[in-house]
Amino acid sequence: MKVFRKAGILLATLLVPALLYLFLRYGTQNHYVLSRYLPKIDSVRGEPLMGKVRLPDGSIMTDTIYNHIPPFQLIDQDGDTVNQSIVKGKIYVADFFFTRCTTICPRISSQLTRVQDIFINNPNIVFLSHTVDPAHDRPEQLKAYARKYEAIPGKWYFLTGTKSQIYDLAMHGYYLPTVDAGLKEGNPDETFIHSEKLVLVDKEGIVRGFYDGTDKEDVDKLVLEIRVLLDIYSKE
């Protein structure tokens, strides 16, 4: 009798964790939520604007209205003119840098290389790096920089344009600080002030997260939240 009791206890010990795993794996459904950033503000009341929003199932609800990254027309590392069509229907990560930068930019670009490699087989993930030094960073400089960080053509774009185009996009599209402080003793690193942030943007052009591109742990969070966003879209 004791033998059967011990056998029963052993069987229960083995089966319960397995059954629990099967229940959690197949009997439940995970629901992930990822915040939206940069709501439109009512200039009179100082509160987020609300409006009618159409859901994927066609229904209408009242929700906060968010800023979208505005349309753009810039030049990539191949000298081609590109616009927002390169990110249409895609999730993308954006940043601002310049090729002569020797401080935070190499660290940010190295982290982006790592993120690119993680999503190398997913065509719905792309990267946009905008130069804040367009007078120097012509397509040939951007091309050399892209090769240095093993950027995949058609997946990671290095973009230039006029200073007003780039700076307006940074400050009024992504809401990131960007300043040309003027050349200081020939040191470009002190000339251009820009953010170390990486910006995650969804398929609708709404910002879903800001991350410190020099911090591996924060970039790991970016990777996780890209996967969350992919999961959200897969369930729509």
Image: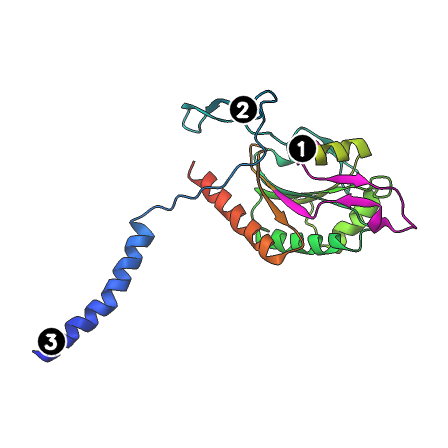
Name the residue at 46% across, 44% down.
231
User: Eyeballing the image, is 59 above or below 92?
Assistant: above
Question: Gap in Å between the C-alphas at discs 3 and 1?
Answer: 70 Å
Question: Where does residue 35 sit, x and y in percent of width and height?
Answer: 51, 39
Q: Classify residue 159 by image quadrant.
A: top right
Name the residue at 16% across, 75% down.
7
Q: Are marks 2 and 3 in contact (CB under 8 Å)?
A: no
Q: Classify residue 208 by image quadrant.
A: top right
Q: Is residue 34 left or right of residue 180?
A: left
- Residue type, mark 1 in image: Gly
* Foreground tag (3 vs 1): 1
User: Eyeballing the image, is 205 above or below 28?
Assistant: above
Mark 2 sits on what residue? 49
Mark 3 sits on what residue? 4
At numbered mark 2, what does the secondary structure look like: helix, strand or loop? loop
> On residue 173, which mark appears?
1
Foreground of the two, 27 or 178: 178
Q: Disc 2 or 1, which lies upstream in sequence?
A: 2
- Extreme residue in the left direction: 1
Question: Where does residue 148 sit, x and y in percent of width and height?
Answer: 76, 55
Quadrant including the N terminus: bottom left
The question of residue 53 being in magenta is answered with no
